[in-house]
């Protein structure tokens, strides 16, 4: 979680926690897989009636709003594989990034997360 919240590189985390960089990588992969297994199967769509019943005042002019979508890019280390580099390089950000899309209901509950 420190890796995501602070944007630290694996090398920095290894130094910070006095462990090898490959151990940091394995921990990050393990947690990512665990969170995917835990959250990947969760029912995330809120019924339309529930969303309408709890619509914030800011959405009074948009009563049919079901989801607010935003896309983001998180900076990542450059992979050693050229194929992977081509998949994660962002010309918009001019470095390697993980790309994702997030959807929230009007009252703020996360209802969609891209894989």
Image (cartoon, rainbow, N blue to C red):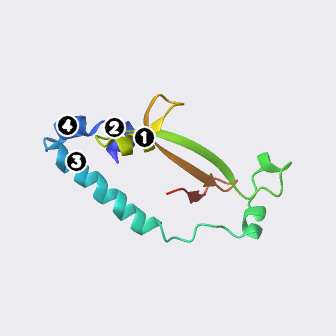
**Along the line of sight, the residue nearer the viewer: 98 or 19:** 98
- The residues tagged by marks 3 and 4 sit, at their Cα atoms, a distance apart of 11 Å
Q: Residue at x 59, y 44 (%)?
A: 71
Q: Which of the two discs, 4 and 1, labels the residue nearer the N terminus?
A: 4
- The residues tagged by marks 2 and 4 sit, at their Cα atoms, a distance apart of 17 Å
Mark 2 surroundings within 10 Å by alpha-carbon count, few (fewer than 14), some (14 through 19), many (20 or more): some
Q: Is residue 63 left or right of residue 105?
A: right
Mark 1 surroundings within 10 Å by alpha-carbon count, few (fewer than 14), some (14 through 19), many (20 or more): few
Whether pointer 3 and pointer 4 mark residues with C-beta atoms closer than 8 Å, the reply is: no
Disc marking residue 16: 4
Marks 1 and 3: which is nearer the front?
1
Q: Quadrant of residue 32?
A: bottom left
In the rendered image, the vertical position of residue 108 relative to residue 10, given as above or below:
below
The x and y percentages for residue 45 are 64, 67
- The residues tagged by marks 4 and 1 sit, at their Cα atoms, a distance apart of 30 Å
Marks 1 and 2: which is nearer the front?
1
Q: Which of the two discs, 1 and 3, labels the residue nearer the N terminus?
A: 3
Q: Which of the two discs, 3 and 4, labels the residue nearer the N terminus?
A: 4
Q: Quadrant of residue 19?
A: top left
* SS at badge 1: helix
In the rendered image, the vertical position of residue 94 relative to residue 26, given as above or below:
above
Q: Residue at x 34, y 36 (%)?
A: 78
Q: Which residue is mark 1?
A: 86
Disc marking residue 77: 2
Marks 2 and 4: which is nearer the front?
2
Disc marking residue 24: 3
**Along the line of sight, the residue nearer the viewer: 50 or 94:** 94
Q: Residue at x 22, y 36 (%)?
A: 11
Marks 3 and 2: which is nearer the front?
2
Q: Which of the two discs, 1 and 2, labels the residue nearer the N terminus?
A: 2
């Amino acid at each position: 979680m420190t890796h995501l919240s602070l944007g630290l590189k694996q090398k920095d985390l290894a130094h910070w926690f006095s462990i090898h960089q490959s151990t940091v990588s394995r921990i990050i992969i393990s947690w990512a897989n665990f969170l995917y297994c835990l959250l990947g199967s969760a029912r995330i769509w809120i019924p339309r009636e529930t969303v309408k019943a709890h619509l914030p005042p800011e959405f009074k002019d948009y009563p049919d709003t079901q989801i607010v979508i935003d896309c983001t890019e998180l900076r990542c280390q450059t992979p050693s594989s050229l194929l992977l580099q081509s998949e994660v390089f962002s010309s918009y950000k001019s470095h390697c990034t993980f790309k994702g899309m997030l959807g929230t209901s009007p009252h703020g509950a996360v209802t969609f997360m891209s894989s």
